[in-house]
Amino acid sequence: MKIVGFVGMPTSGKTEAAKVAQCRGIPVIKMGDIVRAEVKARGLDITEENVGKVADELRKTEGMDAVANQCISLISETPSSSCDAVVIDGIRGIAEVRAYRKAFGNRFILIAIEASQKLRFNRAMARKREDDASDWESFKQKDERELRWGLTEAMDMADISLDNNGTLEEFKKQAKSILGGI
């Protein structure tokens, strides 16, 4: 079984690529779901501030690979006979990449998804997800927080890079082609 991880800045297109995988019958594990579940378990509302704070706290108290380790457990519980691949949506740092590479070796394929900051901001404003930044300043702060987690270094370790500065249809076509080759 191949393990395919998507890494990129917020709203770069990781979730859109994961949707392409789901349409191909590939199970997707969303790292953000683990953080959002922890936010809810603490009795907090799902907001950008709370999600960011809890994600930071998890990494500080349990290690920079804390969320990845929970995903590794979920993947390890997936019967290998049930699927040829699993996608991880939302890798955010170098420690997570290292954890996946240690757990899965050469079965782990990292795909970086890149898009300009202005385009990513416009996407966040359009989708209005409850944990998205609500203005330019908070968007930049979210970027800075995630860069502190080693996101640039993680993207530099990618086996494949996808450019998502064009249309959604172009991006989905690229993602479908790459996933088909895996």
Image (tube, rainbow, N blue to C red):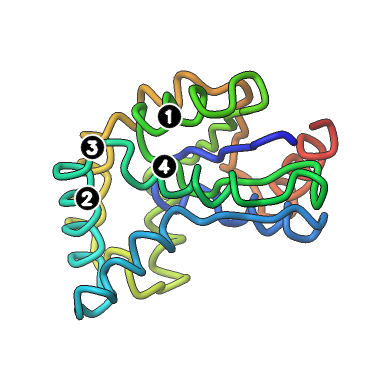
Q: Say which of 71 and 31 sits in front.
A: 71
| Mark toward the start of the polypeptide (1 vs 2) | 2
Q: On the rendered structure, is 93 left or right of 179?
A: left
Q: Say which of 29 and 73 sits in front.
A: 73
Q: On the rendered structure, is 160 left or right of 79?
A: left
Residue at horizontal 59 percent and vertical 20 percent from the top = 105
| Mark toward the start of the polypeptide (1 vs 3) | 3
Residue at horizontal 59 percent and vertical 42 percent from the top = 164
Q: Please name the amino acid that badge 4 sits on.
A: Ala
Q: On the rendered structure, is 160 left or right of 35?
A: right
- Give the residue pinned by disc 3: 63
Q: Please name the amino acid that badge 1 sits on.
A: Ala
Report how far apart the C-alphas of labels 1 and 2 lie in the structure.
15 Å
| Mark toward the start of the polypeptide (3 vs 2) | 2
The answer to whether the residue labelled 4 contacts the one labelled 1, judged by CB atoms less than 8 Å apart, is: yes
The answer to whether the residue labelled 3 contacts the one labelled 2, judged by CB atoms less than 8 Å apart, is: no
- The local crowd at label 3, few if under 14, some if 14 to 19, many if 20 or more residues have their Cα within 10 Å, is some
Report how far apart the C-alphas of labels 3 and 2 lie in the structure.
7 Å
User: In what quadrant of the picture does the N terminus appear?
Assistant: top right
- Give the residue pinned by disc 1: 99
**Circle number at residue 39:** none
Horizontal and vertical percent position of residue 7: 49, 38
Q: Say which of 162 and 51 sits in front.
A: 51
- Give the residue pinned by disc 4: 68
Report how far apart the C-alphas of labels 4 and 3 lie in the structure.
10 Å
